[in-house]
Image (spheres, helix red, strand yellow):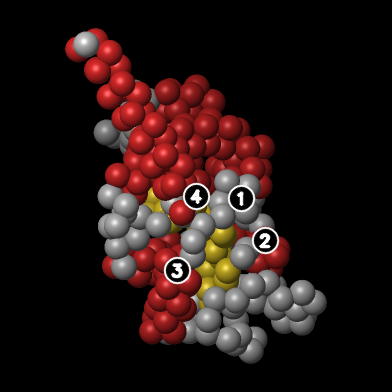
Amino acid sequence: MFLVGLSGGIASGKSTVVAVLRELGCAVIDADVIARQVVQPHSKAHQQILQHFGTEILLENGEINREALGNIIFSQPEKRRLLNSITHPEILKEMLKQVLKYFVLGNVAISTGYRYVILDIPLLFETRGLTRLMKYTVLVYCHSPCCPRKADPPFPPTPGSAPCSPGSDPPTQLLRLMKRSGLSAAEAEARISSQLPLDEKRKWATHVIDNSGDRDSTRRQVLRLHTRLEDSLDFLWARLALGTALAGFGGLVFLLIRHFIS
């Protein structure tokens, strides 16, 4: 089993790609879902956030008002870095637990187990340490209709892109975010600018999915990517290693039992 990091800009359509992967039966670990879990009331991260941001960011039920907190961190970079320093370690611990679960399941059921696990991480490319854990990294992007479309299949980064590159002209991304979250243009731009530009992320991705077109086009690209990953042999070394270890452990247990019986 190997790890595949999935990321994209805000409102670039990453959720569409994840939905297709789940339909295909892929194992997906969602960092956003975990981020909500680790800040539930009475958790360690929840208490630390209250210490630094105050109780005015709470809802009536004691949960954190994500919109209020977002307005703070997207306008104050130092506050965003502080929040990340609180939540990221907790998120990473939970992600590692889930990776271990899929690793065990994949190796116990050799024929039907998971060959790879998708880690859906919005800030994957901003957190360079995480990319080193991934065998492959996938970027989902969208670009302005004025820019020419690239080929449908997932393709590696292309050096020397033209000035009208997929990530350099963000109107589509901006409009999607404003519509999805009810933000003003200024608020949406602040959120987009808090992340690396899409063309910068594209340099680090091993695969790119263009979500500028319709859903069918995106789905075809995801299907081709899934087939490529399923056909990869990168998962074999881990299963062989675990199989060898289990066989050795079983042999040791057998010898010990024989020794005590005799």
Mark before the other along the chain sequence, 4 or 2: 2
Find out whether the residues at labels 3 and 1 contact each other: C-beta distance under 8 Å.
no
Find out whether the residues at labels 2 and 1 contact each other: C-beta distance under 8 Å.
yes
Instruction: Tell me the element at label 2.
Output: helix
Indicate whether 172 appears above or below 133: below
Q: Quadrant of residue 201?
A: bottom right
Give the spatial CA distance, label 1 vs label 4: 20 Å
Identified by mark 3, the residue type is Asp
The answer to whether any part of residue 54 appears in the image is no
Residue at mark 4: 237
Give the spatial CA distance, label 4 vs label 2: 25 Å
Mark before the other along the chain sequence, 2 or 1: 1
The residue drawn where x is 58% and y is 86% is 151
- Give coordinates of residue 205: x percent, y percent: 63, 63
Q: Which mark is residue 204?
A: 2
The residue drawn where x is 70% and y is 65% is 203
The answer to whether any part of residue 241 appears in the image is yes
Task: Choose mark 1 or mark 4, whichever is in front.
Answer: 4
Q: Which mark is residue 231?
A: 3
Instruction: Tell me the element at label 3.
Output: loop
Mark before the other along the chain sequence, 3 or 2: 2
Give the spatial CA distance, label 3 vs label 4: 14 Å
The residue drawn where x is 67% and y is 61% is 204
- Give coordinates of residue 143: x percent, y percent: 59, 78
- Viewer-closest of 175 and 168: 168
